[in-house]
Image: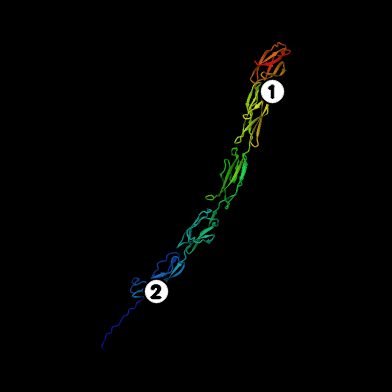
Amino acid sequence: YTISFVDGTLTVNKAPLTASADNQSRVYGQANPALTISYSGFVNADTAAVIDVPPVASTTATAASNAGTYPITLSGGSDDNYALTLVDGTLTVTAAPPPTITGQPQNLTVNLGGTAQFNVTATGAGILIYQWLFNDNPIAGATTTSLVISNAQPSNAGTYSVVVDNGSQTTSTGAVLKVNQPPTLAAIPNKTVNELTTLTVAVSATDPEAGPLTYQLTQAPAGAAINATGVVSWTPTEAQGPSTNTFTVQVADNGTPPLTDSKSFTVVVNEVNSAPVLTVPAPQTVRVGATMTITSTAADTDIPANLLTFSLVSAPTGMVINSTTGVVTWTPPVSEQSSTNIVTVRVTDNGQPPLSDTKSFTVTAVGVGQRITAIQPTNGVIVLTLEGIPGETYHIQASPTLNPPIPWSVIGTNIVGTDAMSQFIDTDASLYPIRFYRSVKP
């Protein structure tokens, strides 16, 4: 045999290698986990590190993707020694547990036109999404942890809540918004009152929230007051009439700060004439022939004070009074040995209508000497009753006869009391069958 050598070829084919995307899972709202690849079919103790161009794993799922399954897709990859077979995997997104609300929105009361702000705090897995509700209806654009309502109006009053969503939902408790509106004070009609007369005016107010109301006078004359129920009272003094006065009543609710309403009204005070008050002297005593000068006085409480005129209603002859000063003068005539006179004085003002006051006092006119008014025999003595000028001293004289020359002799002395009267007792009267008496000024 002749042997001929012919070379042959050894073909080394690529070893099959399977690259499989590892299945993954996560909770809704979380970031995707790292996407890994597992290999099977390596020979000669090779590892993934020998692959010239490793395949790439990817998925369409994002952190915001809803719960569900999403493919993990392998693409690309090549190697000189391995023929790659790519096997896709699955990413499973599971629903997150519901968020926990750690700070609930609170009830609020704001004044009309004010600003209300509701807040919520929550914790939970993934991305938390907020949606505020008004009376269970979504509010467009209200998707943050705070809800601000500016220029609050009655239409904004109601219940506010918020839904917190991370794939699962939790709804807050409802917070009630009250919009406080100002009270309304009813119009108050103008009034007229006489001075020194009490005026009462009941004012009324309404409040949409029916809360407690507080009344006060922000403008009023001195002495005016208003009570807790809204009743205004005032008694104008003499000095406050006549006048025109403005009252302003304010009502406030219990808001923070309180809302108010005010109304004003006018009170006209009429001047009322008050009668003057007359003061007359105490009882007077005057000697005949002497001039008595005394003064009657009067007070007028009207402001401004009225002009006063004095006059005598009744008086003894010759007595006069100064119509301006009230000075009374009188000189009892000598012929009027003794008399008691009632003097009545009147004072009249010039008010409208004129008013007056009248009072009386007594004036006793006594003679220069002392007059014996009574002789009373009593148990052997004679009791003389005499009238004279108070405080004056007189001699009592007696005589057994009135035949001239009359033998008058002083039998005693007496002093007239403050009431112009005095007594003298003649203890020797029984010694004479008849006896005459007289009183003389020493």
Tell me if residue 387 comes above or below residue 190 in the rendering: above
Q: Quadrant of residue 243?
A: top right
Residue 377: x and y in percent read 72, 17
Which residue is at the front of the view, 236 or 136? 236
Residue lying at the far right in this picture: please name it: 433
Assign the C terminus to one quadrant of the image.
Answer: top right
Residue lying at the far bottom in this picture: please name it: 1
SS at badge 1? strand
Is 374 displayed left or right of 152 in the figure? right
Residue drawn at x 64%, y 24% as measured from the top left: 292
Q: Which residue is mark 2?
A: 86
Assign the N terminus to one quadrant of the image.
Answer: bottom left
- Kind of residue sitting beneath label 1: Ser
Which residue is at the front of the view, 4 or 438? 438
Q: Bin the neighbour count of mark 1 within 10 Å (Cα to Cα): few under 14, some 14-19, many 20 and up.
A: some
Q: What mark, if any, has residue 339 been given in the picture?
A: 1
Is 106 displayed left or right of 440 in the figure? left
Residue 193: x and y in percent read 62, 42
Residue 308: x and y in percent read 63, 32
Q: Earlier in the sequence, mark 1 or mark 2?
A: 2
SS at badge 2? strand
Residue lying at the far left in this picture: please name it: 2
Tell me if residue 234 comes above or below residue 161 in the rendering: above
- Kind of residue sitting beneath label 2: Leu
Residue 320: x and y in percent read 65, 26
Q: Quadrant of residue 360?
A: top right
Which residue is at the front of the view, 290 or 171? 290
Judged by depth in the image, the label closer to the viewer, 1 or 2, is 1
Q: What mark, if any, has residue 20 been given in the picture?
A: none
Is 326 displayed left or right of 133 in the figure? right
Q: Bin the neighbour count of mark 2 within 10 Å (Cα to Cα): few under 14, some 14-19, many 20 and up.
A: many
